[in-house]
Amino acid sequence: EVQLVESGGGLVQPGGSLRLSCAASGFTFSDHYMDWVRQAPGKGLEWVGRTRNKANSYTTEYAASVKGRFTISRDDSKNSLYLQMNSLKTEDTAVYYCAREGAYCGGDCHDAFDIWGQGTMVTVSS
Amino acid sequence: DIQLTQSPSFLSASVGDRVTITCRASQGISSYLAWYQQKPGKAPKLLIYAASTLQSGVPSRFSGSGSGTEFTLTISSLQPEDFATYYCQQLNSYPPITFGPGTKVDIK
């Protein structure tokens, strides 16, 4: 079964750190770009960032709201994706999802987030 | 950054109704648009990619159209399991990848 399972969420004080993990199974993890998306309580979806695959040098990109505070990494040998979150703010409180980017290629290629984890809740509060 | 707007933000409809949701981009994104469905407490689910291609396993009552700056998601005959929030997403120009604010489809 193709699936993603996040872990590592919890309660943390403002200014603190937390590391989220996402375990992948049922597909060739190393082939895919992987993303983190978050959703604050009662709000919409916000893209956090992505890591490309080895063929694209594992380059990363981030939303402006987290750049310099969050770091995305991956370990293809463990089929795992990570999100290191530092200097956390109350506005980082959200459910964090990892998502697989599928590349659908015909005449050209279109990406889409075709597999999602169940999410892990991060609460930043004193 | 490319901004996405959705209309309406909320709609109330009955089972069997035809429903159309519009997504507009602040600049042209060709057909690099996807649609997702999210039910309360659940992760989003991919419905459509490349603006109009139905993801495997998604019922054919869902369809997408558009290119450039205006896109639509249509549900031809609303079913009880379709009551959810729908988001569009652009993957043409990044970072950032952006989502629309969502359209909640509720039972009339």
Image: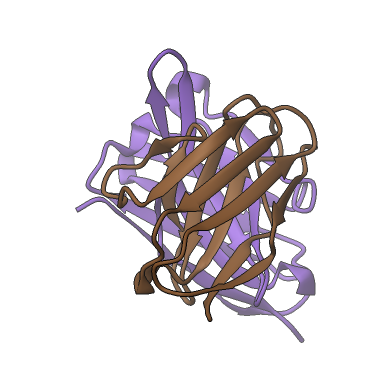
Chain colours: A purple, B brown
In the rendering, at what x and y percent does residue A32 appear? Answer: 40, 34
In the rendering, at what x and y percent does residue A71 appear? Answer: 64, 47
Q: Is residue A71 visible?
A: no
Name which residue lies at 27% across and 36% down: A28
Quarter of the image holding residue B78? bottom left
In the rendering, at what x and y percent does residue A13 appear? Answer: 73, 79
Q: Is residue A113 above or below residue A44?
A: above
Image position of A117 (left or right of B4): left
Q: Is residue B60 visible?
A: yes
> In this orientation, which residue lies closer to the viewer: B38 or A2?
B38
Callout count: 0
Q: Is residue B8 above or below residue A67?
A: below
> In this orientation, which residue lies closer to the viewer: A89 or A37?
A37
Name which residue lies at 77% across and 70% down: A91
In the rendering, at what x and y percent does residue A56 appear? Answer: 51, 21
Name which residue lies at 60% across and 45% down: B89
Q: Residue furthest top?
A: A107
Image position of A96 (left or right of A91): left
> In this orientation, which residue lies closer to the viewer: A23 or B60?
B60
Q: Residue furthest front?
A: B17
Q: Is residue A91 above or below residue B30?
A: below
Name which residue lies at 49% across and 41% down: B64
> In this orientation, which residue lies closer to the viewer: A62 or A105?
A105
